[in-house]
Image (cartoon, rainbow, N blue to C red):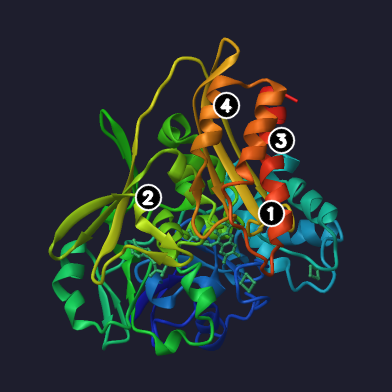
Amino acid sequence: MAKITLNGQTFESGSDPRKPFLEVLREEFGLRGTKYGCGEGECGACTVVVDGETVCACLTLTGSLAGKEVTTVEGLANDPVGVALFNSFARHGAVQCGFCTPGFVMSAWQLLAKQENPDTDAIRDAVGGNLCRCTGYVRIVDAIRECGLGAANSPVVARIGEGGASDYVAQAYWRPASLEELFHDLGSFSDNSRMIAGGTDLMVQNEHRLNELELIDISGLSELRGISQSDGSITIGALTSWAEIGRSKLIERWAPLLGLASHEVGGIQIQNRGTIGGNIANASPAADGLPGLYVYDAMVELASSSGQRSLPIADFMVGPGRTSLAAGEVITAVRIPKVEMPGTPLVFFEKVGPRKAQTITKASLAFHGWMEEGRIVAPRIALGAVAPTVLRAREAERMLAKDITVAGVAMAAAQLSGIISPIDDIRSTAEYRSKLITGLLRRGFASHAGIH
Ligand SMILES: Cc1cc2nc3c(=O)[nH]c(=O)nc-3n(C[C@H](O)[C@H](O)[C@H](O)COP(=O)(O)OP(=O)(O)OC[C@H]3O[C@@H](n4cnc5c(N)ncnc54)[C@H](O)[C@@H]3O)c2cc1C
Ligand code: FES
Ligand code: FES
């Protein structure tokens, strides 16, 4: 039974811990201000705040909230910043049907908790994971910018829970508190059990049959979270969220492609919840985290009750949705060697999708090298969504190391179409992907190095 603090009061939820929290909020607690829009993390109508971060309640497992502080739109009724936002939305005509409004207010409330007087760009970023189908965004952004109150006025903004105890419900759901506990009892679960971290892939893939799964919720394993460095490498815990990666100075210094990718993974609510370990284990060739990891020759760190091993990312990936993860094994971290070359870093992550925000990749290209005296040192390129796994483009790397004139870049770009094996699917055609990938390299050099 999950003990959850909801709008300041602690409750024991009697619901199945595998239920999405949105259902529990609306059915068990009768809090219907949080809306069900898409059920897939796309619309933000279900946005709530958990331990100071916005998440989609439709993709948040109830059991994972044990020991956490949850604030819903009802919890803002007596909060001065919440009330200022409600009034400002009304004053600016930023509400028509009102279905999306609770989600927008929650995202705005969290932004104001972290930033005094945010500008229009910051507001647009903060509500990038919220959709409105009738009002239009200009009025909503104006309402947030001109609400007139900031975090200092809110007494409830910094609510953080005490942390989750380990939770166990028969063979249906288990939330171990440490790796030691995980490995001790893992054997008692069947081969059909599934691990779940942030749940942003798994819950979408199993939307209608979560209650048929045996879930091992690893989100409470705090030893798998965080970013650290040693002399030769940086280590990113598997449970580190995309939002944490996006804020990290170590990532910015040593693995900036992951920082760029972090802002591409869904909206803020998804970035707060989705983890790098989940992105790797899900093994989608379109995953935004993977091209950067290929460029950096990352090592995937694995552990099981019988020991530890590490594999280069390219060996870990087997095919779409398939990895070398063995039964009973968990990804604990990724390790990235620190590489530094003479010159100025040239780094870009070019991605094309059906729309600008919240979009799954049609094709992507990650590049990291160093510009020095008119040449490029140690160029490294990885390509996403154009083959069964992400690819390193080693021949194109060699070509660029010799020649980064306009003609040289064009030749390296043309070479890319010879190594890919794109497919037709619902997101794009093989032919279009092939054209895209050559354009992405040229576009990267044009916009980031002025070579065009
Ligand atoms: C609206 C929306 C938009 C999205 N947009 C993007 C996008 O633009 N780009 C992108 O790359 N992704 C996107 N995603 C996918 C997803 O958010 C990411 O792949 C995320 O990193 C998954 O992490 P998670 O912790 O939520 O994974 P989960 O869903 O918890 O797990 C995914 C898989 O990995 C396994 N797993 C998780 N952690 C471990 C571990 N430590 N060891 C072993 N196995 C593990 C699980 O068993 C499961 O099979 C989007 C998702 C949604 C819902
Ligand atoms: S209901 Fe649309 S994001 Fe949750
Ligand atoms: S006001 Fe109707 S969806 Fe936004």
Q: Earlier in the sequence, mark 3 or mark 4?
A: 4
Q: Secondary structure at mark 4?
A: helix
Residue denoted by label 4: 400
Kindly state the secondary structure of the residue where label 1 is placed.
Answer: helix
Q: Is residue 93 left or right of residue 317?
A: right
- Residue sitting at the far top: 373
**In which quadrant will I find the C terminus?**
top right
- Crowding around mark 2 (Cα neighbors within 10 Å: few <14, some 14 to 19, many 20+) is many
Q: Position of residue 163 (x, y in %)?
A: 32, 62
Residue denoted by label 1: 433
Q: Amino acid at mark 4?
A: Leu
Where residue 131 sits in the image (x, y, percent)? 73, 64
Q: Amino acid at mark 1?
A: Arg
Q: Residue furthest front?
A: 418
Residue at mark 2: 313
Q: CA distance from mark 2 to mark 1?
A: 23 Å
Of callouts 4 and 1, which one flags the residue occurring earlier in the amino acid sequence? 4
The image quadrant where one finds ligand 2 is bottom right
The residues bearing labels 3 and 2 have C-alpha atoms spaced at a distance of: 27 Å
Q: Alpha-carbon neighbours of circle 4 within 10 Å: few (<14), some, or many (≥20)?
A: many
Give the residue type that dot 2 points to.
Answer: Ile
Above or below for 201 versus 271? below
